[in-house]
Image (cartoon, rainbow, N blue to C red):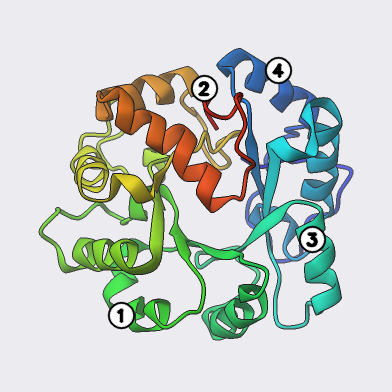
Amino acid sequence: MHFYDGRYPASPGSVLFPPDATPAMYSALREDLDIDRTVVVQPTTYGLDNTCQLDGMMQLAEGSGAHTVRGVMVVDTSTTQRELRRLHEAGVRGARFHMLPGGAVGWDQLAPVAMAIADFGWHIQLQMNGRELPERLPLLLDLPTDVVVDHVGRFMPPVTTQDSAFHALLTLIETKGWVKISAPYESSVSGAPDYVDVEPLAAALIERVGDKALWATNWPHPGQTQPPSPHELLALLARWIPDADLARRILVENPTRLYDFPESPTSQTKET
């Protein structure tokens, strides 16, 4: 999820300027959904300035404990090891690369940033048009970190499960990656409520690499004029994952491993 707050300056390269989405607003959603843990992701709106998200993480931690909050921020080759250490101590566990309009860091910095964060045990979170995956696969496989691919691969427009781009995604996940079963509206042409052009991709990923799959609210759904409610997205997920054991793995166990959440009685029974 992302925080937005007009008090924090937007990056000059921003293309999205959503209305405020504050820690207080998200806390109400978190309670409504009975979510126990949160991963805060730096949105493109703020470029390399992670302050808004870090402040939001701190406010969430004050209410529920630092062990329930993790972050994925944006860094580049100018980010010092001292700053990376500070971010790690604040709960950051990944570096985000958004390879679509508005992204702050390009492909040329992917490998050196991955080298810089590897010693901290961080991952690269990657959002791109999944149709480009065959071209980028050798680079991604050569990184010294795990790679988390956003939004069912975000194939724009969706491909079939037989497409070479989808097979490239499977290769990446099976080798060193993870995938978020989230935000089907980012790529779907058929649209809500069923996203029938994305569903086969989600189903195939859940079947093939369910132990490396994650879920996200993507709250507050930036760029969407008619965003689905979180309850609608949870209902969609329940249809895609009817098996309770697999649902527990995706909602509880997988994020515990990836984001370095501590094991606890609470984390064993609630979702992220």
- Residue 245, quarter of the rendered image: top left
Judge depth for marks 2 and 1 and give the one in front. Answer: 2
Tell me whether the residue at label 1 lies in contact with that at label 4, contact meaning CB atoms closer than 8 angstroms: no
- Going by the numbered disc 2, the residue's amino acid type is Thr
- The residue where tag 1 is placed is 135
Residue 217 image position (x, y, % from top left): 52, 33
Task: State the residue position of label 2.
Answer: 269
The residues bearing labels 1 and 4 have C-alpha atoms spaced at a distance of 42 Å
> Is disc 4 in contact with disc 3, using a CB cutoff of under 8 Å?
no
Give the image location of residue 85, x and y in percent: 81, 67
Give the distance between the C-alpha atoms of the residues marked 4 and 3, in whole angstroms.
Answer: 26 Å
Tell me where residue 5 appears, x and y as whole percent.
81, 40
Tell me which amino acid carries mark 1.
Answer: Glu
Which comes sooner in the sequence, label 2 or label 1?
Answer: 1
Q: Quadrant of the C terminus?
A: top right
Question: How far, Cα to Cα, is label 3 from label 1?
Answer: 32 Å
- Determine which residue is flagged by label 3: 87
Q: Secondary structure at mark 3?
A: helix
Foreground mark, 2 or 3, reads 2
Q: Identify the residue at the far left of this view.
A: 162
Closer to the camera in the image, 144 or 48: 144
